[in-house]
Image (cartoon, helix red, strand yellow):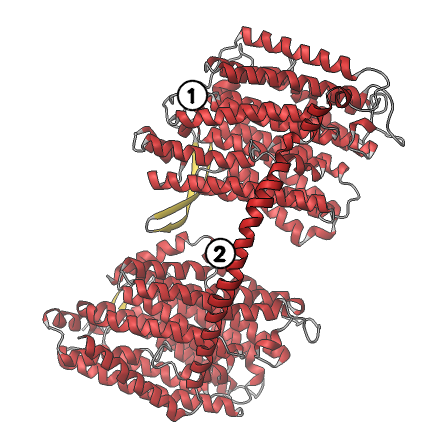
Amino acid sequence: MDIWALLIIPLVVSVFIALVARKNEELSSYVSIGAVITGFFIVLPYVLKLPGDPNMHPIEQAFTWIDIPGLKVEMGTLIDPLSIIMLFIVTFVGSLIHIYSRGYMHGDPGYSRFFACLSLFIFAMLGIVLSNNLIMIYIFWELVGLASYLLIGYYYEKPSAADAAKKAFLVNRIGDFGFILGIFVIFYATGTFNFIEIEQHIAAGHVSSGTLTLAALLIFCGAVGKSAQFPLHVWLPDAMEGPTPVSALIHAATMVAAGVYMLARTSFLYAAAPDAMVVVAYIGGFTALMAALMALGQKDIKRIIAFSTLSSLGYMVLAIGVGGTGAGMFYLATHAFFKALLFLGAGSVIHACHSNDIWEMGRLYPKMKATAVTFILGSLAMVGMFPFSGFWSKDEILSATFESGNYFLFAMGVLTAFITAVFMSKLVAVTFFGEKKYHGHPHESPYVMTVPLMILAVFAVIAGFAGFPGLEPNFGSFIHTAASGLLEHGGRGVHAEHRFNFMVASLSTVVVLGGLVLGWTIYSRKGMKSDVMEEALPFTYKLLENRFYIDHIYDTYLVGWLYNGMARILNYIEVNIIINFVINGMAYFTRQTGKGLRLTTTGQLQNYAFVMVGGVLVLMIIFAAIF
Amino acid sequence: MQMNLQLMTPEFVMLGTAFLLLILELFMFRGSRKVTGVIGIIGTCIAGYTLIGAGTGKAVGGLFIQDTVSIFFKWLFLVITVLILYLVMMYEEKIRNWRGEFYVLIIFAITGMMFLSSITDFVGFYVSLEFVAVCLYVLAAFTNDNPLTVEAGLKYLVTGALASGFLVYGISFIYGASGATGFVEVAQSLKTADGNGFLIVGITLLVIGLTFKISSIPFHVWAPDVYQGAPTPVTALLAASSKAAGFIVIMRILFTGLIHIKAEWIMLVSLISGASLIFGNLAAMPQKDIKRLIAYAGIGSAGYLLMAVAAASALGAGAIMFYLLTYVFAILGSFIAIVAFNNSEGSDLVESYAGLSRRSPLLAATLFIGLLSIAGIPPLGGFIAKFYIIAAAVKEGLWALAVIGVVMAVVAMYYFLLVVKSMYLRPPKNTDPIRVDLTTRALLYFINAVTIFLGVYPGPVTDWVMDIARVLF
């Protein structure tokens, strides 16, 4: 029952704030924070039991939701190492970010609304993690989309925020359309939505490989939307219009990782569809490299981190694509810590400087030591410096890619790591060191904001040891259990547990060090007012700054030509044929018939009796004619 | 002859309550009779208590049967009684004379319906039916100071008498063809009989006679005038329980007594169903009075339920029960809101509901949920019910009816949304909030919660009604 409480508490709190407590800001924030911390303490015993029992048997609790002939839908929860780790990340990072928000959102007019949406998000996110079937995951998938929409558009009076919210929602719809089609394909092929039953059907070889590939690719569409992979990555940078804690929680640590989690949950499907896995791997690798390049051309501190998130998500998807589900989930976990830390640190800086432009900051280190130190630790984890957490998880992905034998993807991964090191060192050098370029008097944020930073920093540094190769059982072995199947069978192409590859590790360390040195030498020079790259390579910089003009192409061609053109044609059909002729004509006809029929009820009793007897006669005659 | 009278305990409790109230009435002064309503509700609850774990079996030599189907319908009737008695307590200011008797007649009518849900014999059926009908005739004309009500009562009486005539005539043909009055015996004797002309005339007259209770074509003519003119609690009683009673009888007669000649009546029921769907929904569109609107919509609802009858399967029977369950809650919630609104504003016109959402969000929400549930919009109970009915029809190959049902669901959306538009989008003429007392609020919250629950999590309820429905086949 405690597992259901995980879902019920945030939902009740969200409704409670929306209906009852919305006038009382203090109460709203306290119940919302209380809900997520309660969730954390419900999850904690499961997490603590995990190292002692890495091969735990999945616990499934379900009840029938809809039961009509031919269609049975359950609502249920599935507890296994995969979901326990994800639950831990969501509730732990969620708790810290809720606490941080109390300080960050202080004095905002929509304070209660913010916490109501946050609790709604926690409810929906936990729903995704706990789902034991595809329909339930889809429902909660849409609910996190709703929460994300509400929170990106939190400053709805700002047109850019309202547009960004709409863009996020619509772009996600494209992916979700594929996702629901994939669910239908699976249901058509297996007759069930339940993960364990689907896996049994696939393991028994009931489903043809073509169907599996189709289903895997369609379901991957959902992940492409939610986890912002190319070509649907365009919404995530714009989503930074939301408040910074939202960017940290939803658009870095948890929701965008839901796509990766869903791929891990359905890894048995991908293991049986090697062709689909190749597509997944290339999309992931390409997104990682593309986003890292785009990050080079940005000025806005949140956008730089947003592009690095895109790149990290690409890494995770790459890991799933080369069969390293364990590596992908490990990266997801460490990424949640250091990326939340980076966003919250950025929030703290923005809070102090009242600007997002890194070229209006500079030399903040002496002014805000706690933020700076934790931010630097987070950056080192992000670039994958030994021995920070990012090193271990990134290394697992790279060695999984290397061992899969696809050296092209491996090269892309290493190049991404190099570029990441360059732009992260630029970010740190320009923001916290160099010359003073800020206005006013920035000061350190209150404890309610810095303490969560410090806790996250500790995890960003040490979380990697969970995957330490000498440790047994380590992170990889938990996920190995989940990835190699809820049933006991090793899938084709899935090799979740990786040996530590010394060659790959040293190569990536050298590359990262090179990137750091390069970035630091360029951007720590004195007297720099704007990006030197802009003067040195104007064309490349412009290209990167405008994100390879992908958004532009979408706007001009997809929206401008295709969409507007189609809209014009459809509008013509709709107005002239459907509305004027069909709808209005039918409505007119129906209304007139209705008026006519009303006249049959005259109010005269004699007429009524006549209608009754006449009706009987008519029916008798029709009936007599039939028999 | 086995009497087994203990099977009739709930009916006896209801009758006892009614007689007790009649006697108490002698000792009461003029004035409020809320206490009568409270005693009536307590009596109904005791009847419900005796129904918990009630055994199944036959009584009075097989004339009375208690099975899971009759128990389901008895629960439904008891819930209706509680809500209607509460509705009368809200409404009683408007009744000048014989307030106490008003409560008593309602309890008598419901008792008759409880007997109807257990009958196994044409004679018992006709007696119970007339018992209910006489109570309803009196109730429909009860507030005799209003000419509209008197007219409604008279129309109800005359058309009802005409319908009863057809019914008895039909029964006599069937008796002539089979030589029996018990449903099971009729079925046995018809197993071998070929469909001769007299039998077909009998079935036609019988089925048509039954359409009076459920207000479907061709005996629908009374519904709009009576719904509009009768006291609102009586309208609610007619809409909710008269329909339920009609359908349990139809299921018992057609699914038990005449199951072997189903090819003949399926055709007839389909015709009536299609005509009722089209007529009821189209004629509801131009209506201005909300009670009249519900009357026409009720003709449409009867069409949907007849579609499930025409399916003549366990799935169809389960769909009927689930539909009635959602319908009872949706319609009674709406009527409680209508009475509360009328008490404050004195009008039943749709246009007077303008801006209700700002004056009383709860009443507006109740009508919103109740009417849209009847229209069949997810995630409300009515959607699942319509879905079930159409699924049952499609499964039995009644494609034409299913298509009419889906199209008419769109039309239903139109006229119910007109009410919603008036409540939510039109500005109110005066902005004073409408007071609703605490008990009514609690009751409305409960009813709305049930309607939403039946739509969001229908699983256990549909399993339950499907189990019950298999008894009939």
Q: Which residue is mark 2?
A: B379
Q: Is residue A315 above or below residue B245?
A: above
- Front one among B358 and B121: B358
Residue A366's spot in the image, x, y percent?
A: 85, 21
Q: Is residue B381 above or below residue B249?
A: above
- Front one among A371 and B284: B284
Q: Which numbered dot is residue B50?
A: none
Horizontal relation, residue A333 to residue B390: left or right:
right
Q: Secondary structure at mark 2?
A: loop
In this view, which residue lies farthest toward the left?
B192
Q: Residues within 10 Å of mark 1 (few under 14, many from 20)?
A: many
Residue A206's spot in the image, x, y percent?
A: 29, 33
At 86% from the left and 26% from the top, the residue drawn is A437
Q: Is residue B467 above or below residue A103?
A: below
Specify the subunit that label 1 lies on. Answer: A
- Asked which quadrant contains residue A589, the reply is bottom left
Q: Secondary structure at mark 1?
A: loop
Q: Which numbered dot is residue A494?
A: 1
